[in-house]
Image (spheres, grey):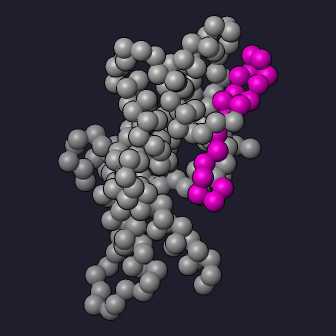
Amino acid sequence: MEKIQLVVLGLTASPASNNAYALILKELEGNKRLPIIIGAFEAQAIALEMEGVVPPRPMTHDLIKSLIESFNSSITEVFISELRDGTYYAKLIFEDIGLELDARPSDAIAIAVRCNSPIYVNADVLAEAGIVTQADEADSDEIDGDNDLNFAQPEKKKSNKPLTKTDQIQKDLDKAIIDEDYEKAATLRDELKKLLESS
């Protein structure tokens, strides 16, 4: 099974759900993003660590890090192994003691950022749920130069004829990606995939 390394790109509020956030992971050596919808507590835990904020009392993920270190162990990697029925599954892998623990991706990543552990995803999961982007170095003349990633958009010719259902979904998907509404983009991607498979 092929593994692809990811890094945490950031967090955005999820407009489709109250108290939910989209955790955006990015290929270390590629142009795909993997959005995962997580709860507010996990989003806060990840954001605090990434911003270097030390809470007055240890949070749950800080406690887990302390436990791991007190047993002289370390997390070899966090592995996002599966996507079933819209739910991601992850594992904390400890090679030094031959242990794999199931975890929610949000918790696993909150621990990984504290332990400086690499994050990997099953290549099949990234192929199914990843959103392709285009790095700004490749098309620097088309970007404003703010070093963000530019979403690759299919070239569309202007036409007066009405859009097919497939074209309309693709148009909505492109807009959701530009707006960074990853939850909507994932839903539209799945809808488009089903439509294309049935035709």
Q: Is residue 193 above or below residue 68?
A: below
Per the picture, the main secondary structure of the magenta-coloured stretch is strand
Rendered location of residue 126, percent (x, y)? 58, 50
| Extreme residue in the front direction | 57
- Nearest the viewer among 115 and 3 is 115
Q: Residue at x 69, y 36 (%)?
A: 102
Quadrant location, the N terminus: top right
Q: Residue at x 43, y 36 (%)?
A: 41
Q: Is residue 100 magenta?
A: yes
Quadrant location, the C terminus: bottom right
Magenta segment range? 84-101
- Nearest the viewer among 101 and 40 is 40
Q: Is residue 25 above or below residue 191?
A: above
Q: Is residue 174 left or right of residue 145?
A: right
| Extreme residue in the bottom direction | 161
Q: Residue at x 63, y 59 (%)?
A: 85
Rendered location of residue 121, percent (x, y)? 61, 41
Rendered location of residue 183, percent (x, y)? 43, 57
Rendered location of residue 7, percent (x, y)? 48, 34
Q: Residue at x 67, y 7 (%)?
A: 72
